[in-house]
Amino acid sequence: MTLVSTLLSGVPLVGRGLALAALIGLAGCEPSGPGSLTAIVQAPGPAGALVIELTGIGITGFEGVGAARTFDAPAAPGSTARRVVVVSSTGTAIRFRIKVEDVSGTLPTAAVVSGVDLSNQPIPSLSEYGVRISR
């Protein structure tokens, strides 16, 4: 006899159905609370470093992934805008994590506002650069 069947042995069939529905409902819930979102830079070519402005509630920090490193300053109290410098030694597949107070909240928006190539020369146009954010 399993633990669940033992616990529900004295419960009528309708009660068992409700308990099962509750368990399935809980299993389908998205995680919430503190955690990290994944950010991937969409770029037409290699980039050495990018300044990315993010807007959203509850952003608490950043973390580089792979060859990427992040640098940021604490946000002003009550501010929903943050800037992070993402530096990449390879220039490709630039990924980083956005630490947030609640991973189930609204995803932040992001825009690349400045950047340099692998030779540390300014990127003249950032119109084709973007950031995809996912849970």
Image: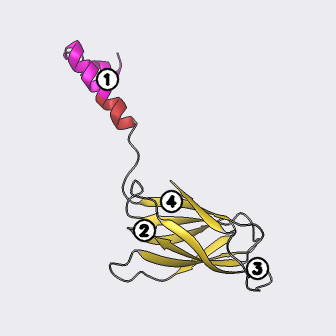
Q: Residues within 10 Å of mark 4 (few under 14, many from 20)?
A: some
Q: Quadrant of residue 47?
A: bottom right
Q: Nearer the viewer, residue 41 or 28?
A: 41
Whole-Å distance between the Cαs marked 4 and 3? 25 Å
Give the percent coordinates (x, y) of residue 6: 28, 19
Residue 49: which disc? none
* Local secondary structure at mark 4: strand
Give the percent coordinates (x, y) of residue 90: 77, 71
Q: Earlier in the sequence, mark 1 or mark 4?
A: 1
Tell us which disc is closer to us: 2 or 1: 2
Q: Residues within 10 Å of mark 1 (few under 14, many from 20)?
A: few
Q: Is residue 23 above or below residue 47?
A: above
Q: Earlier in the sequence, mark 3 or mark 1?
A: 1
Tell us which disc is closer to us: 3 or 1: 3
Instruction: Give the magenta-colored segment's residue range.
Output: 1-21
Amino acid type, callout 4: Leu
Give the percent coordinates (x, y) of residue 39: 58, 62
Q: Quadrant of residue 124?
A: bottom right
> Label 1: which residue?
4
Q: Residues within 10 Å of mark 2 (few under 14, many from 20)?
A: some
- Residue 99 located left or right of residue 93: left
Q: Nearer the viewer, residue 28 or 105?
A: 105
Residue 37: which disc? 4
Residue 117: which disc? 3
Whole-Å distance between the Cαs marked 4 and 2? 12 Å
Q: Are marks 2 and 1 in contact (CB under 8 Å)?
A: no
Residue 56: which disc? 2
Report the residue at 73% width, 77% height from top: 48
Amino acid type, callout 2: Gly
Display colour scheme:
secondary structure
